Amino acid sequence: MSEFLKPPPPRVAAPVDQAELLGKIAMLVTLALVVTALYVGRAVFIPIAIAILLSFVLAPLVRALRRWRVPRVPSVALVVLLAVAILGGFSAIVAQQFADLTKELPNYESTITRKIASIKQLAGSGGSLERAAAALRNIGGQITEPAEPDAAKPPGAPARPPAAQPQNQAGQPQNKAEPVPVEIRPSSDPLSFERLQAIASTVLEPLATAGIVLVFVIFILFQREDLRDRFIRLAGSGDLQRTTAAMNDAARRLSRYFLFQTLMNATFGVFIGLGLWFIGVPSPFLCGALAAIMRFVPYVGAFIAAAVPILLAAAVAPGWTTMLEVAALFAITEPIVGQLIEPLLYGHQTGISPIAVVVSATFWTWLWGPVGLLLATPLTVCLVVLGRHVERLEFLDVLLGDAPALTPVESFYQRLLAADSSEVAEQAEEFIKERPLADYFDEVALEALLMAQADVRRGALDASRQVKIRETIDELVEDLREDGGDPGKTAENEEKAEDREQTSSLSVVCVGGRTPLDEAAAALFAHLLQREDRIAPRVEPASALTPAGLLRLDAAQADVICLSYLDSEVGHAQVRYGVRRVRRRFPRAVILTCFWTVDEAPGKAQQLCEAAKPDKCAFRFGQALHLIGEVARERLGVRGATDVGARAAANEPAAALKGAA
């Protein structure tokens, strides 16, 4: 007896994997070095990034020319010349519009002044608001006013005479220090070195960046296949054929996405420019170009670009109608393009989670400034695609991608551990909109319970947490029943449930084999049975298999007794003696043993079924429903019961459904 009173041995913490720890540290150091290099060398990396994105846009055109039997060199030359011509003409028009706008800005001063005056007059017409503002200004002036030096003197003390000021020869007061006027005049030489340097720094830097981008674009288009092969070799994948196919598919998808996005943003800018020209806003194509460029910024780019034409409309027209028309143009066009046209053409999803869009925009803006803000989404899309196709970069897809971080089974198990039955019920309700609830219990809930059983086997899930999982499953069943998520809770089935007391029904007792997890699986199966016509299930704990527990069962009403086991490592003797006790106590009842381990250990479960010798065996909820339907047809003479189970078991071999009698 003293052996059973000894405390359990303390759990020894698992040793830390030094290689794994060093690998994580090395990855963090490498990531820090990459970010530092991108920041320090941004003058070089920005043109390279722009060139890579432009190559994705131009690559489909090059491939189209190659399919028309045009050699590589002429294909690349024609596409690059076309792109340079379009961008050059576009830049010339925008520059001309900008020059015209700067010339006309002084003419808008009077209109802006009148509108500001009208706004002030409108704000000043409110009496209470004006009085409150005046009172606040008066209080602020009294607080900031310096104290007079005579305030601290006692009453009746003579006032201090004012200090005498120095006087000049004419007898007038003279300040101690008179300001000396300073005048800075530019050099008379219009072509001085400073002016030439300023012009060169303004003009040559963008031209140099454009030249670097052009050179890299040509190089990438010429050496696209070679660069792809080198990247695959660096990725270090053992399956060369599969990796090559994945990278080709990723490159085609990126090219198609960036090409469609560029065309869509350009079309949006042209439409905005035409709309502003029709309204009468000056420099409409400049504003359209700004709208097209800013639309690369997700969510708010187009609305930020709307600020410039709205201000111009306020400066040009004497009233407020033009400004409201411009605001309405952006407010109507952007949702139509973003929510209707884009999903029809190439899909609205970019593959990036919303939080990743915000984080990437912040990161690239901090790293590269305004250019980084424009390139944030395209660069992040490239990183997500690399993470999905390169095993070593999978963490990028996990961090930035829009795919769920956990599978439905893992999510279900995590919610069970967190005792969050409401989210589990919500997941189930979404699933059963398209498929039966039995499929959800088989494919998701049962697999999650098997994960929990694996944790029990390795000592990571104690008894108290198993009980908590059992209680969460009970809450899930109640939520599905009360919230209408159970398809069986229709008005017709509720009327049938009321008639069960007046008609004969099949009594099914679901008993957990050993642990609270077995009881949780039994509760799920009982919930499925409750949805069926003329079947009355109830759930009993594992203690019902003891001699005292068997006495509490109602022998007259137990038509079927279902024993639920999750652990494939359960002993043959334990299951066999449990079946014998039930058979001895209830000789007329059909004994159904359910070993919910068909995917984990199908051979082991079949051996348990043959050793226990029950009347029937099942390994999944759908199979168990089918077997209960057979018993209902035999004993009650009903048809149509457990149609869901019959469909689920239609593709299963008959030998897997029945054990030895």
Image (tube, rainbow, N blue to C red):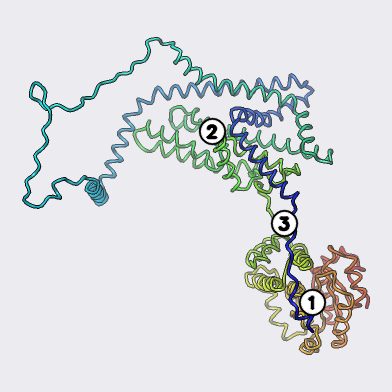
Q: Earlier in the sequence, mark 1 or mark 3?
A: 3
Quarter of image, res 55: top right
Expressed as whole percent of the image width and height from the top left, the position of residue 529 reads 76, 75
Could you classify mark 1 by the number of other residues whose Cα lies within 10 Å: few (under 14), some (14-19), or many (20 or more)? many
- Residue 151 left/right relative to 259: left
Amino acid type of disc 3? Thr
Residue 490 at least partly seen: no
Expressed as whole percent of the image width and height from the top left, the position of residue 577 reads 88, 81
Residue at disc 2, secondary structure: helix
Residue of label 2: 271
CB of mark 1 within 8 Å of CB of mark 2? no
- Residue 141 left/right relative to 447: left
CB of mark 1 within 8 Å of CB of mark 3? no
Decide which of 71, 535 is in the foreground and name it: 71
Please name which of the two marks, 1 or 2, marks the residue nearer to the observer. Answer: 1
Could you say which disc has been placed on residue 216 in the image?
none
Amino acid type of disc 2? Phe
Q: Quadrant of the N terminus?
A: bottom right
- Residue 94 left/right relative to 642: left
Residue at disc 3, secondary structure: loop
Real-space Cα distance between discs 2 and 3?
43 Å
Could you classify mark 2 by the number of other residues whose Cα lies within 10 Å: few (under 14), some (14-19), or many (20 or more)? some
Quarter of image, res 576: bottom right
Please name which of the two marks, 2 or 3, marks the residue nearer to the observer. Answer: 3
Could you say which disc has been placed on residue 514 in the image?
1
Q: Quadrant of the C terminus?
A: bottom right
Disc tally is: 3
Amino acid type of disc 1? Arg
Residue of label 3: 407
Residue 362 at least partly seen: yes
Decide which of 46, 556 is in the foreground and name it: 46
